[in-house]
Image (spheres, rainbow, N blue to C red):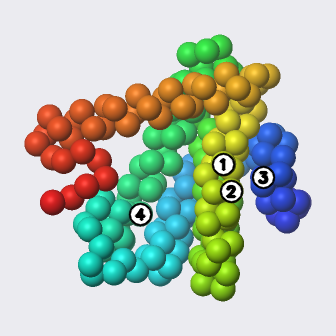
Amino acid sequence: MIDWKGLLKDSLLKPREAGRAVLGWPFATGTYMQLAALTAAVSTIVSTLTFQPADDLPRTIITVLLGQPLLLALLQFGGAVLLAVLMTAGGRMFGGRGDFRGAIALVAWFNIVSIAIQLFFSVTSILLPPLAMLVGIFLIIWFFWALTAFTAELHGFVNGWRVFGGIFAGLFALSFLLNLVFVMAGLPPAGTVN
């Protein structure tokens, strides 16, 4: 039986150990894909309920997507699958032994923990606004720390700093490519909408 509370605690404080536990789950790839779809739907619901942009805010990709929940859920699911593919392929390029099944399991669990943090952030921003900024900073730091730990555990890498460098380089390259595609398509760079 899975100790959910302990796994959540380890995910926040010892993500590599949590990743090892998730990789030990006996479920099939299809189950993890369904879990990734479910987390995309739940995250969309939480996002649209907790963030209502004011009418005077500039239109950005985020504010537009929050008005299109089905599209947001599909993009989140697609992002989860893409992240699992990139975790698998990127790690294998450097001699890792991880597979897509393990990567999608880790991404699905990563999303579950992110939703829990997002809910905590939402409650904190309402009850204790100054603390919300600290929670937001923790979320950004945790995102990269947990992603690095999960990827290292997936592939059996020992050096987390090399994994972090690879993730950072991969995110930079992906951002550059997306902006290049947007510009070639005649769209404004990512993050802005006319």
Who is closer to the viewer here, 61 or 26?
61
Q: Quadrant of the N terminus?
A: bottom right
Please tell me whether mark 1 or mark 4 is closer to you in this view.
1
Q: Amino acid at mark 1?
A: Ile
Question: Does dot 2 land on a helix, a strand or a loop?
Answer: helix
Residue at 35% from the left image edge and 63% from the top image edge: 62
Q: Which residue is mark 4?
A: 73
Between the residue at mark 3 and the residue at mark 4, the CA separation in whole angstroms equals 24 Å
Q: Position of residue 152 (x, y in %)?
A: 72, 30
Which comes sooner in the sequence, label 1 or label 4? 4
Q: Quadrant of the C terminus?
A: bottom left
Tag 1 near tag 2, CB within 8 Å: yes
Between the residue at mark 3 and the residue at mark 1, the CA separation in whole angstroms equals 13 Å
| 138 left or right of 7 in image | left
Q: Amino acid at mark 4?
A: Ala
Which comes sooner in the sequence, label 3 or label 4? 3
Between the residue at mark 4 and the residue at mark 2, the CA separation in whole angstroms equals 24 Å
Which comes sooner in the sequence, label 2 or label 3? 3
Task: Rate crowding at label 1 as few (under 14), some (14 to 19) or many (20 or more) other CA atoms within 10 Å.
Answer: few
Residue at the far bottom: name it: 127
Q: Which residue is mark 1?
A: 141
Q: Quadrant of residue 58?
A: bottom left
Q: Which residue is mark 3?
A: 11
Tag 1 near tag 4, CB within 8 Å: no
Question: Does dot 4 land on a helix, a strand or a loop?
Answer: helix
Residue at 60% from the left image edge and 84% from the top image edge: 126
Q: Quadrant of residue 184?
A: top left
**Residue 138: mark:** 2
